[in-house]
Amino acid sequence: DKILVATTNKGKLKEFKKLFGDLGIQILSLDDMPEKIKVEEDRETFLENAVKKAKEYGDFYKIPVIAEDAGLEVEALKNYPGVYSARFYSIDFGGVYQIKESIDRTNIEKLLDLLKDEKNRKARFVSVVVFYIPEDFGLWTEGYCYGKIAEKPEGEKGFGYDPVFIPEGYKKTMAELDLEEKNRISHRGKAVRKLMEKLRYLLS
Ligand code: ITT
């Protein structure tokens, strides 16, 4: 009845808390943990990174863990930034940028620079969520949200690349959607709902 959502990303944490809101489970975050550890995300796939985070945090704190690795894949950039989404500004893929306003803004600036004059703006968000009970069992699911990259940032909600991501069927960016609506259509929302379905099935 207690789960650690092992993320350092405040935007993500808020979305996870809302998604698990009505289950009567107590959600802990890394801020609630007395001892801190750092887990490096140095693998080449979302799944490997998510499994690594879930295992290292779960085995250390000895409580059930939800860990996620997520990112943005842009078709015209051969699916970059992908697993490098959080630190795209520092990746040697068409220039390394100095952080100005914030990391998110710097990443967005780099992305828009790289897509300048690019007609194909197709992209998708990917979320891989791992649920792990230490020494017992683990489970993973994935979710996708398809859309396109806007010409310029709009909206203040959400986090990361939300201001430049226009979901399919929408005329506004993810950063203009309320938390509830984002969770309804997002990669993260889909992965979490699949996880709950699997758990319900396994526990029935
Ligand atoms: P944790 O590893 O601590 O969970 P993080 O921010 O490093 O936090 P990821 O490694 O999963 O998380 O990196 C995901 C990056 O991808 C994130 O920093 C954003 O730039 C981007 N991203 C993921 N989900 C997103 C979303 O819903 N909206 C916008 N950008 C997102």
Image (spheres, grey):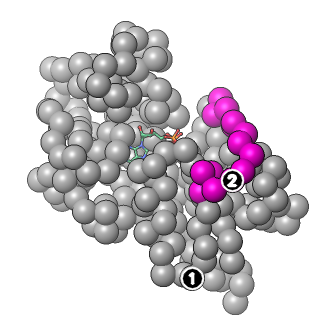
Element type where label 1 sits in the image = loop
Looking at the image, which residue is at 43% across and 69% down? 18
Q: Which stretch is magenta?
A: 29-42
User: Residue 135's quadrant in the figure?
Assistant: bottom right
Q: Which callout, 1 or 2, points to the residue nearer the camera?
A: 2
Looking at marks 1 and 2 on the same chain, the residue that comes earlier in the sequence is marked by: 1
**Which mark is on residue 75?**
none
Q: Residue furthest right?
A: 135
Q: Point out residue 196 in the picture as x, y percentages from the top left corner.
A: 57, 75
Looking at the image, which residue is at 22% across and 32% down? 120
Q: Is residue 178 above or below residue 42?
A: below
**Which mark is on residue 24?**
1
Looking at the image, which residue is at 25% across and 62% down? 178
Q: Residue furthest top?
A: 95
- The residue wearing badge 2 is 33
Residue 76 visible, this orientation: no
